[in-house]
Amino acid sequence: MNASTILVTGATGTVGSALVPALQARGVNVRAMVRDPTRPVPGVENVVADLTDADSITAALTGVDAVFLNSPSAEAAARLQIRFADLARDAGIDRLVLLSQYAADLDSPVRFLRWHARVEAHVRRLGINHTILRPNLYMQALVGFAETIAQGWFAAPIGNAAVSIIDTRDIAAAAAATLSDPATAGRTYTLTGPRAVTHTQIAQALSQATGQPVTFQDVPAEQFAQALRGVLPPWQLDGLVEDYAHYARGEASEVHTSVTDLTGRLPRDITTFAADHAGLFAARANA
């Protein structure tokens, strides 16, 4: 794979920004796809392209051997990813790794899981070598709660359900492994952390890491949604509430070994994530 060039979409995002150095460590040539030319990814080739612009995507795919397909959160994300996959096939790309979501299902009551399942189904029909990654809830999603965590609390409509949350650095490591190993083609990997944890256990890990008490508050879905109205667009807010209902039903608690199978090491635990990011949460407290 040393002579290969891999296009990373969403290269400045949470997963993409960790994937680029993971691929570099494997000696891969990385082409980072960015939307904002003023925010290039250092140390690699950059190409300015947008999933909404087919011509820019075609240009970005020129000379590429493999693609990591992810997209920013958008109401049209499924349609845009499907078109990107079609363009990749037309460009002769024969290796695609798709970032999907844990429990993606065409019949799911959760819109995001249905959308991801649509993309998965389309990619499978394209006839190109592909690998599908289905990560569970990102540990990095806690950054969205950083302001209240710094005040000693955070809230969500999840009750005492456990979720096998995963650090995005481990998602990136798994993605780098699949992009570097053609033997993973045709397979679907569910990516989780090493254990399922409740939000109360997450609060305990944050308390230990920051040295300040942090508590979790279970709240009704409507109260959670009300606090975010005007912050998120309606489609995204409604989908987030559906996600949390999925978690609260205990549907995201299974632990899988895929990260270890692909990388040879255990995924990070919530205690490691909390320790590594303690400064971020503590800094908010003193801001």
Image: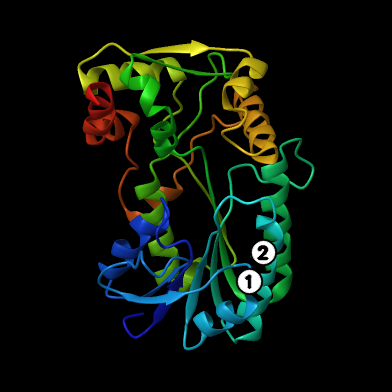
Identify the image's colour scheme: rainbow, by chain, secondary structure or one colour.
Answer: rainbow
Q: Indicate the position of residue 151 as horizontal and vertical percent values.
A: 33, 16
Q: Give amino acid for label 1.
A: Phe
Q: Which residue is mark 1?
A: 84
Q: Give amino acid for label 2.
A: Leu
CA gap between label 2 and label 1 equals 6 Å
Q: Indicate the position of residue 95 as horizontal and vertical percent values.
A: 53, 75
Name the residue located 51 percent from the left edge and 28 percent from the top edge.
163
Looking at the rendering, which quadrant does residue 279 occupy? top left
Looking at the rendering, which quadrant does residue 142 occupy? top left
Relative to residue 61, is residue 201 depicted above or below?
Answer: above
Q: Secondary structure at mark 2?
A: helix
Contact between marks 2 and 1 (CB within 8 A): the answer is: yes
Name the residue located 64 percent from the left edge and 77 percent from the top edge.
54
Name the residue located 63 percent from the left edge and 23 percent from the top edge.
225
Left or right: 35, with 89 as reference point: left
Q: Foreground: 181 or 205? A: 205
Left or right: 247, with 166 as reference point: right
Q: Which residue is mark 2?
A: 80
Left or right: 234, with 57 as reference point: right
How packed mark 1 is, by other alpha carbons closer than 10 Å (few <14, some 14-19, many 20 or more), is many
Q: Which quadrant is the N terminus positioned in?
A: bottom left
Q: Which quadrant is the C terminus positioned in?
A: top left
